[in-house]
Image (cartoon, helix red, strand yellow):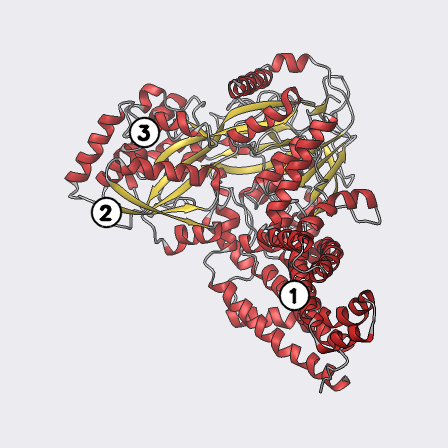
């Protein structure tokens, strides 16, 4: 009875939390209180301070609040994959002119960097030039996202013009990437393009105070911040922020329970959500969302017999994703069955479209029978698999173990080799001594046209060791097409080839983000990525 | 004596050089690449070119002999180099964490000595009584129980019982504050890891104290002292204990050296930003420059502690003479 009551209590509070998260209108109507320091947990250490070169959220969470972006995902509607708002630009995000090839941004006036220097369009141009066309020796991790950009100019101090080579729906989402912090041109000119690896000078809601490597990062309220709050005064509402590094999950859970921190923005597994809800009741609020991260099993096409598409199709057919979603979502941070595009995006496959793909049919028995037939047709009686996994529980080891169990049903005998992260990547990308490896794609702004490059054999992030020219050709058409209906149709072709016909990669489930936080944290809305909505200008404390 | 000290100091040089060679080679034998971890580890899109630039910038493309010369050469210019991960000076990174690790090591040692010596003596003096059995059970439990596990129990215990008694769950602070800034805050954070570590440490030292003292108590000169009519307290304190302390001092010193860089898991459990945590992070990131300097610090601490123990022996036992 006690157990049943506990479960009911958990369900009730989670439900209440979800309702709160969804109830944007109710939240917005509440008048924010000012003051206080938000203490939150950063599950990763900051490498360098330069987000243009880094790929980890470990730099976005503590330092993102010290910077502004040109445009950003709407902090009041972060669940939308298409709602972008101006941050440093004025008014609404501009619509393109010149047949979809020219974007003209008007820049806000009166904004100052922490150093006191005024922000102009030239700072934005210098920043994006560093991101898009860095000189030799300057790393920029996402410069490939801007292949469509032809020129970038500032015709005056408060206008920025991007001219594209071809109209592209991927441009605006790419521009809103949370890594595109606007730097001062004066800093770049005077100190060089590496200065920001160790120094902070932004125009964000918070001013940089200090960073103790491996321990915490502190910021204080920027009195000159440019966004207005619901109370008619400039945001942010908080007096300051403190991001505490806590790399161990157990510490993060305990820290929220013991109120040493109010929130962690990455995400907790379901069991820890339930533990916190049970311990704290109304003092904890839970926000949940689909997560723009997908987990794969990637066959090594250079290892026989995984060069045979029939074998790969058999492997994907044995995965019962629909029941897997049901059970795995109770113990791991995965949930949604989906194709190559983030499930809630207009470009994503519908359930009817999904079920046509190999391994996505709801009749698991039929799938299994087809898998066995394909293996037989490929001349394989016993298939042994060297399955390489990453030595991280959530969700890699959990889902990896599930996969092994699924394959066993088709007589496939997989041996799991769990490796620490450096050795895992060494195996995946250098020695390539694996048959199948766990793999993942975790992006920030939902930008399907950029995100699906993971499936291209030529992508730097692809680990399948294959070349598929027809797939590349489809992608080229998607990239260049300016028509969304056509793009959606092309993406279906791309998806069918990548996941079903060739089964280059076996997409398991999309991740599911769970953020339990202290109920006094208000104003923050969960986004479908742990990289997004991290400027914290709309957060306030109800204490 | 001075000759001996000079000789021992000179011997440290080949020891440290040997350790430097070993750590340099072994680290590079571990599979992995810091740039791959840095770029691919988050699952985000990245350019292969970004990895190539990263490797070039942090010096991974340099020939191995040159990398070794830069590593060892740094000791002559007092420049330990920069971390490959944070690109900040290693001395700065270590300095940030050293105070915390040293304080935990000292506090754990104090806890250990405060528990171990009295319990060890009582256990030896009251051999085969219920007191001896209780102390032995306490010691064996301490040896059997990993300090990180005890740490987890302490934190969970604090959370659960504070909520039950005061209505709000409480746990120790998770950010280090130096003792001169906030002594209470500092103590409320570090006392728990000191107790968790000190208990295990005390268990080893208590057992050693007991057995060493028992051995000394069977010596002829103790029998003579008793025959002379000396009271037991004087026999124990003045004649037996000092001689029994030789192996105990060794154990305490080696444990202390271990604590400086070896609290790998306990620091994670209590979220202490010490050298042990830095060790784990650096190895996990394949940060060669940082890891090799941390290993060298631990080697240096062990060499120095062993040296100090040898010198201390002479004070404890005047029969020991060095040549």
C-alpha gap between disc 3 and disc 1? 62 Å
Residue tagged 1? B211
Q: Residue at x 68, y 67 (%)?
A: B214
C-alpha gap between disc 3 and disc 2? 22 Å
Name which quarter of the figure residue A250 lies in. top right
Can you say whether A46 is above or below B302 in the image?
Answer: above
* Label ID, residue B40: none
Q: Disc 1 vs disc 2: Cβ atoms closer than 8 Å? A: no
Q: Residues within 10 Å of mark 3 (few under 14, many from 20)?
A: many
Label 1 element class = helix
Q: Viewed as shown, does residue A301 lie left or right of B243?
A: left
Q: Are marks 1 and 2 on the same chain?
A: no
Residue tagged 2? A305
Decide if residue B69 is in sight here: yes
Front-most of residues A414 and B196: B196
Q: Residue at x 53, y 56 (%)?
A: B286
Residue tagged 3? A320
Q: Viewed as shown, does residue A240 lie left or right of A400?
A: right
Q: Residues within 10 Å of mark 1 (few under 14, many from 20)?
A: some
Q: Position of residue A314 (x, y in %)?
A: 24, 36
| Mark toward the start of the polypeptide (3 vs 2) | 2
Label 2 element class = loop
Q: Residues within 10 Å of mark 2 (few under 14, many from 20)?
A: many
């Amino acid at each position: 009875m006690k157990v049943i009551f506990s479960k009911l209590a958990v369900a009730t509070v989670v439900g209440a939390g979800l309702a709160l998260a969804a109830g944007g209108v109710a939240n917005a109507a509440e008048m924010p209180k000012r003051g206080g320091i938000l203490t939150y947990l950063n599950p990763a250490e900051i490498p360098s301070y330069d987000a243009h070169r880094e790929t980890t959220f470990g730099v976005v969470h503590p330092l993102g609040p010290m910077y502004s972006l040109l445009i950003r995902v709407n902090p009041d509607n972060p669940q939308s994959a298409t709602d972008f708002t101006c941050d440093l630009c004025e008014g609404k995000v501009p619509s393109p002119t010149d047949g979809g090839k020219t974007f003209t941004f008007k820049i806000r006036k009166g904004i100052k960097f922490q150093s006191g220097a005024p922000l102009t369009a030239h700072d934005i141009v210098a920043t994006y030039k560093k991101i898009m066309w860095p000189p030799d020796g300057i790393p920029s991790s996402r410069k490939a996202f801007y292949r469509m950009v032809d020129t970038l100019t500032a015709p005056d101090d408060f206008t920025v013009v991007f001219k594209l080579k071809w109209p592209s729906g991927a441009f605006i989402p790419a521009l809103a990437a949370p890594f595109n912090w606007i730097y001062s041109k004066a800093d770049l000119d005077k100190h060089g393009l590496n200065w920001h690896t160790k120094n902070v000078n932004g125009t964000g809601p918070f001013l940089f105070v200090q960073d103790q490597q491996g321990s915490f990062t502190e910021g204080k309220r920027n009195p000159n911040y440019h966004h207005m709050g619901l109370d008619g005064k400039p945001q942010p509402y908080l007096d300051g922020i403190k991001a505490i590094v806590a790399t161990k999950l157990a510490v993060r859970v305990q820290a929220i329970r013991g109120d040493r921190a109010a929130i962690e923005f990455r995400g907790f597994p379901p069991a820890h959500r339930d533990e916190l809800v049970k311990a704290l009741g109304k003092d904890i609020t839970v926000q949940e969302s689909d997560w723009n991260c997908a987990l794969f099993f990637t066959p090594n096409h250079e290892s026989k017999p995984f060069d045979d598409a029939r074998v790969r199709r058999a492997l994907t057919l044995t995965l019962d994703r629909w029941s897997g979603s049901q059970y795995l979502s109770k113990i791991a941070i995965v949930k949604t069955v989906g194709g190559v595009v983030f499930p809630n995006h207009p470009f994503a496959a519908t359930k009817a479209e999904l079920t046509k793909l190999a391994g996505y049919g709801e009749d698991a028995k039929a799938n299994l029978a087809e898998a066995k037939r394909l293996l037989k047709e490929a001349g394989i009686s016993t298939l042994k698999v060297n399955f390489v996994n990453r030595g991280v529980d959530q969700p890699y080891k959990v889902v990896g173990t599930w996969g092994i169990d699924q394959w066993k049903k088709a007589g496939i005998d997989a041996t799991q080799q769990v490796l620490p992260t450096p050795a895992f990547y060494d195996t995946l990308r250098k020695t390539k001594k694996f048959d199948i490896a766990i793999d993942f794609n975790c992006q920030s702004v939902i930008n399907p046209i950029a995100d699906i490059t993971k499936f291209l054999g030529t992508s730097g992030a692809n680990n399948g060791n294959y070349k598929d020219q027809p797939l590349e050709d489809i992608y080229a058409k998607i990239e260049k097409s300016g028509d969304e209906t056509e793009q959606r149709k092309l993406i279906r072709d791309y998806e069918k080839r990548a996941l079903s016909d060739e089964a280059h990669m076996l997409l398991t489930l999309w991740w599911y983000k769970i953020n339990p936080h202290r109920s006094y944290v208000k104003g923050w809305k969960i986004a479908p990525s742990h990289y997004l909505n991290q400027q914290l200008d709309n957060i306030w404390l109800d204490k | 004596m001075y000759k001996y000290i000079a000789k021992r100091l000179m011997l440290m040089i080949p020891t440290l050089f040997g350790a430097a060679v070993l750590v340099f080679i072994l680290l590079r034998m571990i599979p992995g690449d810091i740039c791959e971890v840095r770029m691919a580890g988050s699952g985000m899109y990245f350019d292969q070119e970004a990895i190539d630039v990263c490797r070039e910038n942090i010096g991974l493309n340099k020939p191995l002999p040159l990398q070794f010369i830069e590593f060892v050469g740094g000791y002559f210019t007092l420049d330990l180099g920069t971390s490959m991960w944070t690109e900040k000076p290693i001395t700065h990174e270590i300095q940030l964490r050293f105070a915390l690790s040293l304080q935990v090591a000292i506090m754990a040692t104090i806890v250990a000595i405060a528990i171990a010596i009295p319990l060890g003596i009582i256990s030896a003096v009251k051999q085969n009584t219920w007191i001896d059995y209780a102390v032995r059970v306490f010691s064996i439990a301490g040896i059997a129980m990993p300090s990180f596990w005890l740490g987890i129990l302490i934190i969970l215990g604090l959370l659960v019982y504070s909520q039950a008694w005061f209505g709000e769950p409480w746990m120790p602070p998770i950010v280090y504050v130096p003792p001169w800034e906030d002594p209470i805050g500092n103590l409320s954070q570090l006392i728990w890891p000191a107790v968790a570590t000190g208990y295990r440490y005390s268990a080893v030292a208590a057992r050693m104290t007991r057995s060493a003292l028992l051995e000394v108590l069977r010596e002829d000169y103790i029998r003579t002292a008793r025959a002379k009519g000396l009271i037991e307290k004087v026999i124990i304190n003045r004649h037996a204990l000092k001689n029994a302390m030789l192996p105990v001092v060794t154990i305490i010193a080696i444990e202390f050296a271990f604590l400086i860089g070896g609290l790998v898991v306990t620091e994670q459990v209590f979220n202490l930003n010490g050298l042990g945590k830095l060790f784990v992070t650096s190895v996990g990131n394949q940060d060669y420059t940082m890891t090799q300097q941390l290993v060298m610090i631990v080697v240096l601490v062990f060499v120095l502690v062993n040296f100090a123990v040898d010198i201390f022996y002479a004070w404890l036992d005047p029969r020991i003479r060095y040549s």
